[in-house]
Image (cartoon, grey):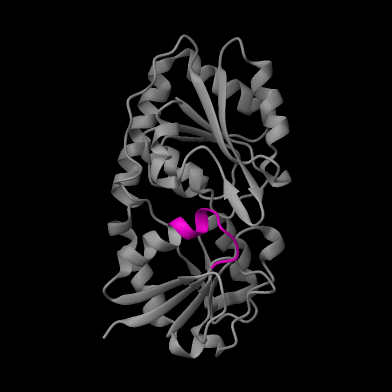
Amino acid sequence: MPRKLAIWLAWANFSEYYSRQLAAVIAPEWETTVTYHPLDWSEFDVVMPFFPGPNRNPDCPREKIVKFVWEPHEFGWAQDAGTVCAASMSVYERIVKRYGARTQYLPWGVNPEHFYPQPQPQEPLPVAGWCGQYKNPRKQYPRLEQEMADISQAVRFYPNLSQTEGGRQTGKYTLEEMHEYYRQINVYVCASASEGFGFPLLEAAACGRAVVTFDVGCARDLEHTGAGVVIVKDWEELQRVVQELNIFRIDYEMLGGASAAAVRRAWTWPVLKPRWLEVLNDAG
């Protein structure tokens, strides 16, 4: 019989999509329940709050709790977990000092049926993209918008903005449709002050896009697997690199090809499934 996993969600955003993607991948070894409400956790072998918040402490033995930590302010919220996961090496390197042998590096995967290489748009000006909750201060969106406006003679900035109201994140596209957005850009730009993983970085790379980003989330991990990621140190370098890539179109086409190849090689769910099974099977 399959073991039972509960994924406990806090609010309606990308977490539900990725939880259901995971559930499909690890079946039939694991029977997964995705819920927004507390359940009788004794019925499950492993309980995984998607976000580790202080109000997400399942009433069950610690050894069956698996928690991800994402942003720096969450690093202390996994005290009750038997297994503490980081989706990116940048987070892993910080939390392993706190949680030691309980810490696991466990990146999330991408569904190649939803995110796949797209032809590059051929517009008069190359297009730089960004997506996310623009009101989240850690995303630094207002500053990024201004930086892109300053180089508008060379680049058209086309963001995909989402909002959060009533515990639900909404935007123009569902995640199953997001490839339609990435199809309209040439380069994905990330200027976040911090990221626990940065799902749009992985999604854009899967769609064959160059990525220009600060050293946050999975940027370093993608780069190490050969994706076309350029990591910059400050705003001035971000502006310069975006302009240079978009002046010489061959550069972002080459980097985009490298991104698509790296994701297919190292980041799809079939590739990452054994790692997830290993961590889940060791828990509980």
- Residue closest to the eye, 101 or 260: 260
Residue 46 in picture, x, y percent from top left: 45, 81
Q: Is residue 153 left or right of residue 204?
A: right
Residue 175 in picture, x, y percent from top left: 44, 46
Residue situated furthest front in the rendering: 166
Q: Residue at x 49, y 79 (%)?
A: 47
Q: Residue at x 67, y 27 (%)?
A: 145
Question: Dividing the image into 4 quarters, which one contains the N terminus?
Answer: bottom left
> Is residue 207 at all visible to an observer of this figure?
yes
Q: Quadrant of residue 143?
A: top right
Q: Is residue 136 left or right of residue 242?
A: right
Q: Is residue 270 left or right of residue 97?
A: left
Residue 201 sits above or below residue 47 on the image: above
- Residue closest to the eye, 14 or 278: 14
Q: Quadrant of residue 253?
A: top left
> Is residue 231 at all visible to an observer of this figure?
no
Is-magenta flag for residue 174?
no
Q: Residue at x 67, y 72 (%)?
A: 77
Q: Quadrant of residue 235?
A: top right
Residue 227 in picture, x, y percent from top left: 40, 39
Question: Dividing the image into 4 quarters, which one contains the C terminus?
Answer: bottom left
Total label count? 0
Q: Is residue 36 left or right of residue 98?
A: left
Write down the region rendered in magenta: 9-17
Residue 138 sits above or below residue 208 on the image: below
Residue 61 in picture, x, y percent from top left: 55, 90
